[in-house]
Amino acid sequence: MNVLFFSLCCTYGIAFDMVGWYSTSNALDPLMPPESFPWDWYTHMVYGQPVVDKEGVASCNTSDVDLARVVKLAQLHGRKLIWHHGLQHVWQIMSNATRAQYKANYLASIGQAVRDCQVDGIEFDYECPSTEWGRMGVVTPYQATLFTQFMADIKTAMGPGRQISCDMGVWGVTVGAYPFMFEPWVNVSMVKAGAIDYINAMSYHYPGHPGDVFPWKKDAFILSDIWGIPRDRINLGIPLFYHVADKQEVTWNTLAMKCPNLDPQAIDCAGVRIVSKEENRLIGNWIAKEGFRGAFPWAASYDTLQWNNTMAQWIFEGMQGR
């Protein structure tokens, strides 16, 4: 898909978001150098962060050659380059009056930082307040409003045309879900009013049988029908990491070599339960059919470009109705 088609399809609302984190360590991945990144399938790459000093002042590291390299490629392909926020102890910054000046300094400086580095927005991977209840996914309406307002303030501070987003957990009793998460981590009324641009649902499930996409439908129902988050603000997450017998995690790019040319229906690779190629396509189909914003394969750099096992293509083609 060329840049002109991307521009036209997004203008007329045909395309869907596909948000991918590139290397969670913020280091360039030798298994997927940015020049080889599947730009055609993604609309957003999340990479890097501002420099934030001890007073909360954010700035662009203009000597970061890796960031400059990725920004240039994103611009060449007509894609958005999104930063992580670069902050430590987010909840304390939002809720503690003694951090008010730190917060003010960040808001006063982040706009210049994103302009200097030519990035297109900021994403929060904010997984609840650092309290006992928060770690179980319990967030009060007050806390959700504080978080949403902070993001809205950052969006305003960055200036026109830049996006703010966050990753949010899902209710459930499966691995990675939150059984006590009965309220969303954002203020839904503010989201509806445009305070933030979109939410990436951390819906990382592992199907029980081939073609099983019910867990994603369950998450989508809770997010949109129960909590009232607009569908066009929700990207549904799909894992590119898997759990092995000793409770450790393995990324798809290291597992995929053990099952080259994997059958599209297969939900197992070398004894590890995975989301199949066909399930990725079906989830993409359902996202498009039901009017959701797009997909959030986590993480993009966990995918592989080898062994005929690239998962991003299946998600993308599913959203295109193929």
Image (cartoon, helix red, strand yellow):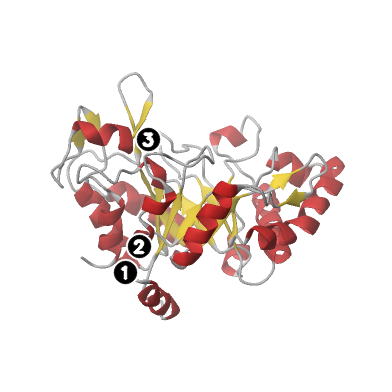
The extreme top residue here reads 246
Q: Secondary structure at mark 3?
A: loop
Q: Earlier in the sequence, mark 2 or mark 3?
A: 2
Q: Is residue 41 visible to the viewer in this orientation of the structure?
A: yes
Disc number lying in front (1 or 3): 1
Q: CA distance from mark 1 to mark 3?
A: 36 Å
Q: Nearer the viewer, mark 2 or mark 3?
A: 2
Give the class, few, some or many, for how many residues have Cα within 10 Å of label 2's Cα (few <14, many ≥20): some
Please tell me whether mark 1 sits on a helix, a strand or a loop: loop
Look at label 2 and name its amino acid: Asp
Which residue, given by chain and number where applicable, does mark 2 sit on?
40
Give the residue drawn at x 22%, y 48%: 277
Q: Amino acid at mark 1?
A: Met
Amino acid type for the residue under numbered disc 3? Thr
Local secondary structure at mark 2: helix
Local packing at callout 3 (Cα closer than 10 Å; few below 14, some 14-19, many 20+) is some
Image x and y of residue 309, in percent: 22, 45
Mark 2 in CB contact with mark 3 (< 8 angstroms) = no
Q: Is residue 204 above or below residue 75?
A: above
Which residue in the protein does label 3 denote? Answer: 174
